[in-house]
Image (cartoon, helix red, strand yellow):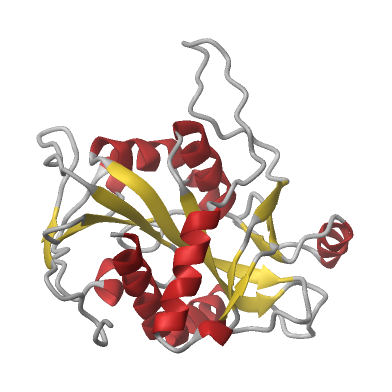
Amino acid sequence: MTDKRSLSGFTGSATETGRNSSPRLIKRAIGLILGTGLTAKDVFAEVDGAGAQTLRDFGCWIAHDDKVDIVIIQRHGLAQAIAPHLIDHNANLQLLLSLNCALILSTSAVGSLNASLPVGTLVTPDDFVDLRGSVTTLFDGSQPVRHTDMTAPFSPHLRSAIRGACGLLGRSEHVVDGGVYACMAGPRYETPAEIRMLRTLGADLVGMTAVPEAIVAREAGIPYATLSIVTNMAAGMSTTPISHQDVSDIVTHLSERVSAILRTAIQCLV
């Protein structure tokens, strides 16, 4: 069982990847990509992120343990200022691979298209619909084409670890297992007509970031799962306009719960 904000045995350090430095190699690691409203220090109080920057100014920290190291990337950058369509998912994946990450967990803020998934619900989606209108792939034409199977785009094993973490914390009712994540390009929110279309396609959640991560991780053969945080009802599902500040506020409100789940899930995986 973890305490409120630390993981026994972990120490923290910032790492920099750039023109004049390279990250130290780790024997065994788990990647953790944090989305809107969460920082490395929210999950691991021990990390020291003072001024650390990585590829394309992404914040990257490492929490160390005898068994495993946690490589933490803030998806939207140190200042939470990188828009969804500008995120270099390939660079993030390559960074995690270079640090020997064997699997990746993430968080993702999402809108709900399903009345049974109200604001505050945590979900581990098991499938996706990609409607961004762009291609995300590790294959750049310099190698023979490879068609990657996407039957299970979100790792069942990692989703099970998240459920197990909730059970250990006595919070099994707080995570819904399974659901279809519809991915849109952003950075704008969707229109009510788009949401009606997505519901017709069977989507339960809508977001902008987890699907390209799932794609490149699957292409690289790295298990990946996301813990989606329902921050708002999608356009047309509520009379309340959607604001990024409200989205961030919901994540902040749930950050302690989400962080405890992530820390405990990692313990289940090592």
Residue 129, horizontal then vertical, whole percent: 72, 49
| Horizontal relation, residue 174 to residue 200: left or right | left
Q: Residue at x 66, y 70 (%)?
A: 111
For the N terminus, the image quarter is: bottom left
Q: Which residue is drawn at 69% across and 83% down?
A: 118
For the C terminus, the image quarter is: bottom left
Residue 145, horizontal then vertical, whole percent: 58, 15
Residue 13, horizontal then vertical, whole percent: 11, 60
Residue 239 seen in the current view: yes
Query: Nearest the camera: 43 or 177?
Result: 177
Q: Residue at x 34, y 74 (%)?
A: 264
Up-down relation of residue 260 to residue 90 (above or below): below
Residue 183 seen in the current view: no
Query: Nearest the camera: 50 or 111?
Result: 111
Query: Nearest the camera: 15 or 29?
Result: 29
| Horizontal relation, residue 147 to residue 133: left or right | left
Up-down relation of residue 184 to residue 265 (above or below): above
Query: Nearest the camera: 207 or 151?
Result: 151
Report how many numbered discs are placed on residues in the image.
0
Residue 83, horizontal then vertical, whole percent: 49, 54
